[in-house]
Image (tube, rainbow, N blue to C red):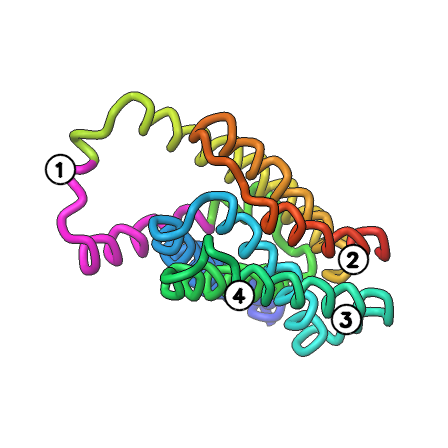
Amino acid sequence: DHRDLHYPLRRQRQMCIRDRLKIFYISLVSATLQYGLTFSGLKILDTSTAALLVQTEVVFGIITAAIFLKEIPTKKQLLGIVIACSGTIILLGTPSVEGKALGASLVLSGAFCWSLGQVMVRGLNGKVGGFTLICWIGIFSSPQMFIMSLLIDGNPIPIIISASVINWLTILYLGIVMTILGYGAWFYIISKHAMPVAMPFLLLIPVSAILGAMIFFGEVPSLSLIHISEPTRPERISY
């Protein structure tokens, strides 16, 4: 029967459609919701504090991977999670977060959404390449974000028209360097390695984030923020 000859092609097409549907949900969770929550929280918190809170995505990622992917962390990794959680609890009690509980909650929620999205990407089992995946996420998330911006923030067109050169350069950097290059490489890494192995490398982010905040915004991190970043080091070494 000639229909049997076309069955593999039909099945491949159906799998592609299922993969795109998965990517649609990934874009909703790890891009639209995550960026909306994180950037909303960043408007309330200072950059250094937000950068440290975002690192809870490592903890969330390892825990969700253990639940959904059965990638069980080692005892040393569990100890690292406990230490990281302790640092987050201490940070929430510092003056930099005082009166800004909403901002901290938004950033933490964004970190959880991002981690869940990475677990969903890991669930693709490397079927989609890193740069192809970030391309599809951009295609799906762009209209999602525009609609959410329209509903929550109002008409974004005047803001787009009045954006300065610095604003556009920032957008280009976020779009090309951070998103295309950064996420393309990151998706390749998590397609090849278990989440408990890959996630701790994200703990390098606060160093560059705090330095960037000091250089570009003149923010001076308090001693409490510097001390809070210390406990994450054993977690990084233990992997």
Q: Residue at x 34, y 54 (%)?
A: 40
**Residue that label 4 marks:** 112
The tag on residue 158 is: 1
Above or below, comparing residue 138 to residue 100 in the picture:
above
Q: Residue at x 54, y 55 (%)?
A: 54
User: At numbered mark 2, what does the secondary structure look like: helix, strand or loop?
Assistant: helix
Image-quadrant location for residue 159: top left
**Disc 3 from disc 1: Cα separation:** 47 Å
> Taking 235 as reference, is 98 left or right?
left
Give 215 or 8, whichever is nearer the viewer.
215
Between tags 3 and 1, which lies in front?
1
Q: Do residues under tags 4 and 2 come within 8 Å of each other at their CB atoms?
A: no
> Taking 70 as reference, is 160 left or right?
left
> Upstream in the sequence, badge 1 or badge 4?
4
Callout 4 amino acid: Phe
Between tags 4 and 2, which lies in front?
2
Magenta extent: 137-159
**Residue that label 2 marks:** 235
The verdict on residue 22 being magenta is no
- Which quarter of the rendered picture does the N terminus lie within? bottom right
Q: Position of residue 208 (x, y in %)?
A: 61, 35
- Which quarter of the rendered picture does the C terminus lie within? bottom right
**Residue that label 3 marks:** 71
Q: Position of residue 185 (x, y in %)?
A: 65, 40
Callout 1 amino acid: Pro
Above or below, comparing residue 182 to residue 28 in the picture:
above
Between tags 3 and 2, which lies in front?
2
